[in-house]
Amino acid sequence: MMNLSPTEMDRLTIFTAAEMARRNRARGIRLSHPEAVALLTDEVMLAARRGLPYAEIRNLAGQLLTTDDVEPGVAEMVTMLYIECLFAEGTKVMALFEPISPGAQPLLDDVIPGQIISPADDIEMFTALLTTSIDVVNTGDRDVQVRSHTHFFEVNRALDFDRAAAYGMKIDRPAGTGIRFEPGVGKTVRLVPIEGDRVIRGAGGLVNGPLDESGAKEKALELARTRGYMGA
C-alpha cells in the first residue's frame, strides 16, 4: 500500500492534466486555460527536479507554448503564474510573467477572455405561458428581495398583493434574477405559472405538496391568513 501526502496527490493531478494537454497538442488541438497552466506547471516542476538552475528554468518556460498552441484569449488569461518547485536546496516559488509567447498566426483583436457573445435581438422568455400582472406594495420597514424561482404566493408576509392571484405562480424573470421591493414603494410585477410537477416544498410552508391537489389552494390561503400574510 502506498500512502500519498496531499502535495503528492496534487502533483499527480498536475501530471495527469499535463499529459492530456500534451496529447491534445500533439494532435493539433489548441489548449484550454487549465491545460496550458498544467503543461507549464508540470514542465517547470520537472525541470526543478532535474536540477536545472532557476534562471534556466524561467527561460525554458518561456519557450514551451506560444499563442498558436492555445485557444484564443488563453494567453491573456495567463499573464502571471506562480509555481512552487522542489529544488535540491529546498522549495522555491517560480514566478513566470506572460509565459505564453506570441506565435506566428495573427491574434484576434476582438477576442476578450470570458466574453459572452449573444444575438443582437432581445431573447423573449416564457412566450407560450399565460401571464398575470399584480400590484405589490412592501408594508415592511426594509427591502425584500424575491428570486425568480420562488413561489410568489409564499413570499414575505409584509408584501401586500392579491395572494390568491399569485398562487402557483413565479416571477417572469430568467433563472438567477429577481426583484427588489423597497418599503412603501408599489410595483407591478408579471408572473407566470410554475411548470414541471408543480410540487412546492418548504418556502413559507403554506403548501408543502402538490399545487393542484384538491383543496390545496383553499388550505394555503387559510393558513396564510392565520399567519398574517398581507393580501391573503
Image (cartoon, grey):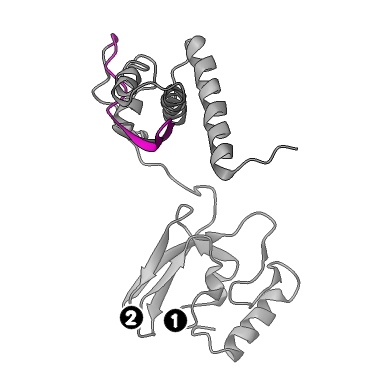
Q: Position of residue 232 (x, y in %)?
A: 54, 84
Residue 93 falls inside the magenta stretch? yes
Amino acid at pointer 1: Asp
Q: Quadrant of residue 154?
A: bottom right
Quadrant in which residue 9 is drawn: top right
* Residue 220: x %, y % from top left: 65, 79
The answer to whether residue 115 shows anywhere in this view is no
Quadrant in the picture for the N terminus: top right
Please say whether residue 173 is visible from this viewpoint. Answer: yes
Answer above or below: position of 35 versus 64: below
Task: Give the residues drawn in magenta, as a range.
Answer: 85-105
Residue that mark 1 sits on = 160
Q: Residue at x 54, y 27 (%)?
A: 15
Nearer-N-terminus badge (2/1): 1
Q: Position of residue 113 (x, y in %)?
A: 33, 33
The residue under label 2 is 183
Q: CA distance from mark 2 to mark 1?
A: 11 Å
